[in-house]
Image (tube, rainbow, N blue to C red):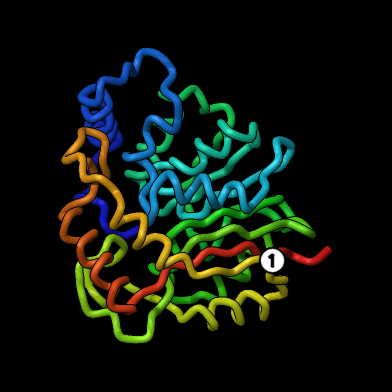
Amino acid sequence: MSGLKQHYAAEGIEQRLLSAIRAAGLDPEHPIAPEALGALDHFHTGGLRASLELMTLAGIGADERVLDVGAGLGGCARLIADKTGSQVDCIEMSSDYCAGAEFLNKLTGLSASINVYEASALDMPFAENSFDVVWMQNVGMNIQDKQSLYSEIFRVLKPCGRFAFQEMAAGETETRYFPLPWASDASDSFLAPADEMISGLTGCGFNKVLFEDTSDEHMARTAAAVDSGPTPLSLSVYVDDLSIKAGNAKRSLSENQIRLVRGIFQKPD
């Protein structure tokens, strides 16, 4: 996922996270509820609220095995493990994010429920038919080869398994404002129109259960939100120029350069 500050050793990112957690008044000596970290570790449009909504749509059960693709700091994985009791595996290409995810897993007491792997979404280190649910939020924008991505997800899902995702899709006009939360410039951004996403997934063998554009709903929520000012727990702990990137994303949405979509697709029995 693009947007991470310069590379840190594991100890470096742990100290940055720990400082922010303490500044927010949380006690790292006792287990921290995953939702209390939501402003820090849900690096995607809509944040914690969007994750909770997608989790409800996915209908994840306690006896199901879940894969979080492009997990970042593992906020979604911890939320899923805590709320459902399921076992969650994460893959993430950034070693810094992997180190941060494992550190936060310890602070929330969820290390036994979550495994973190440094790996590519295009070459997942899992056997066929391994997972009941594959989860992905705001990751595909950085992956050019969508068909290989969808094929890998299809491969690791069990029959009747679900792919639950949230994604930025291409709008009606060209994306012009950079940097964005997922891309410093146009060379890092690989948006696909919504109809291409649907056809790509169904072409791999998936059945569509749900696909919806939530852009207007998200913009309405953003407009109604009360600006409480800067807080110690925010993405700015590890993302450079966050206010600029967020502003460009808001402007891009309002001008229909990008669209926010989510969906549930199922592998046939």
Which residue sits furthest right? Answer: 269
**Residue at x-position 32% and y-position 79%:** 257
Secondary-structure class at tag 1: strand
**Which residue, given by chain and number where applicable, does mark 1 sit on?**
209
Structural crowding at the residue carrying mark 1, measured as other residues with C-alpha within 10 Å and reported as few (<14), some (14–19) or many (≥20)? few
Q: Is residue 149 toward the left or the right of residue 63 in the image?
A: left
Q: Which of the 4 image quarters holds residue 82?
A: top right
Position above or below: 46 against 109: below
**Residue at x-position 31% and y-position 63%:** 182
Which residue sits furthest front? Answer: 224
Where is residue 33 drawn, in percent x and y? 45, 25
Q: Quadrant of the N terminus?
A: bottom left
Q: Is residue 62 toward the left or the right of residue 159 in the image?
A: left
Which residue sits furthest bottom? Answer: 173
Q: Which of the 4 image quarters holds residue 170?
A: bottom left
Where is residue 148 drawn, in percent x and y? 56, 73
**Dot 1 amino acid type:** Val
Where is residue 49 drawn, in percent x and y? 44, 46
**Residue at x-position 68% and y-position 58%:** 162
Number of numbered discs on residues: 1
Near-viewer residue (136 or 227) = 227
Near-viewer residue (100 or 164) = 164
**Residue at x-position 61% and y-position 54%:** 134
Where is residue 64 drawn, in percent x and y? 71, 42
